[in-house]
Image (cartoon, rainbow, N blue to C red):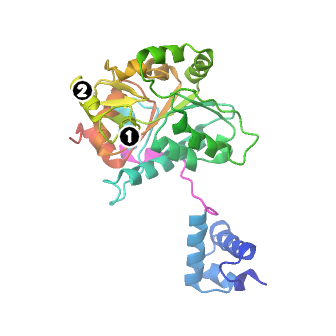
Amino acid sequence: MSPTTTDPHTGWADEEQLLRAAWYYYVDQLTQDETAKRLSISRASAGRLLDRCRKSGIVTFTISAEHYDAFELARRLKEKYGLREALVPPDLDDDTLRQAAINRRLALSGAQYLNAHLKADDVVGVGWGETVRKIVAVANPDVLGRVSLVTLTGGVGGYVDTLRQVRRGREDAPAHTVLPTPIAASTPELAAALRAEPSVQDVLDTARRADVALVGIGAVATHSTLSQLGYASAEELDTYARAGAVGDILGVFFDADGQIVDVPLHGRRIGIDLEDLRRIPHVVSVAGGIDKVAAIRAALRGNLVDVLVTSENVARALLEGDDGA
């Protein structure tokens, strides 16, 4: 049976029709009318096929990260904060107040950046959090399949899905290394004992030698990842804020200048510290949402990141000096 007369739910023949539509339109650059004629279907049906091609992943789009300078906000962010690169995807009107939508768009931009810049055999240190996980999910699997991942903190459960996504269907992918501890132990004494374990020290040493680090930036807020995971209560976060903390990276809290604020959680935390992070040659941070402006600005002032991927409204606030409070 010809693929042009196939019921739209019949397996391989349906997939062949999708592929034909995609090839005619995107590769041969025929118009939608011409594509429809080639397939002996209506123009509306051709449009639906092309829409399915995009939604199913048969067709994907890549905007080279090197061209993000075309956005004036990105160029100004680079200049103001001395960044290696800034990526500022344009906001959608209905995105600006929904964190999940913001994270999804930022993840796509972060993935594009990694696709363009990761090299074979790079060691990539990964933080935890929703946006980092989304980046790994949408990044090019062929690119990620050539690098080794190492976790920058404890918290095995938070990394399992991320690492599984990278190795799915790729038995030849390099081995990945997970710090076999919680993010924070129940007591400082237990944390010290775990850090002294040779297996933990080996992973931390690997993390410190990473070529690239991928991290998020958290606000001192009750909806932060640390709070949601139960590592910091609302009362504790309030205490940290009164002590001058405006944000955290990898569970390390810092003030408006990006300097560490001494809080009790740090004694129980297991992972690389901010000085270790500064020594990693290429630190990529993905963070958006207007409530994170103060935290992002502080991280930039403290030279904690080299590449920032953020939302358009946050970029404007960073340039205007408005913390969005």
Badge 1: residue crowd in 10 Å (few <14, some 14–19, many ≥20): few
- Residue drawn 41% across the image and 30% down it: 249
Where 78 falls versus 187 (above or below)?
below
Q: Which mark, residue 1?
A: none
- Residue drawn 55% across the image and 71% down it: 51
- Residue drawn 40% across the image and 48% down it: 71
Q: Position of residue 204 (x, y in %)?
A: 56, 20
Q: Position of residue 285 (x, y in %)?
A: 45, 36
Where 236 falls versus 292 (above or below)?
above
Report the Cα–Cα distance between label 2 and label 1: 17 Å
Q: Secondary structure at mark 1?
A: helix
Q: Which callout, 2 or 1, points at the residue further toward the start of the chain?
A: 1
Where the N terminus falls, by quadrant? bottom right
180 relative to 254 in the view: left or right: right
> Which residue position is annotated with label 2?
239
Q: Secondary structure at mark 2?
A: helix
Q: Quick check: is 206 in the magenta stretch?
A: no
Q: Is residue 65 visible?
A: no
> Which residue position is annotated with label 1?
228
Q: What is the magenta range?
A: 57-73
Q: Foreground residue, 257 or 200? A: 200
Q: Amino acid at mark 2?
A: Thr
Where the C terminus falls, by quadrant? top left
Q: Position of residue 206 (x, y in %)?
A: 61, 22
Badge 2: residue crowd in 10 Å (few <14, some 14–19, many ≥20): some
Where 238 falls versus 37 (above or below)?
above
Q: Position of residue 288 (x, y in %)?
A: 37, 44
Q: Foreground residue, 18 or 318? A: 18
253 relative to 23 in the view: left or right: left
Q: Quick check: is 60 in the magenta stretch?
A: yes
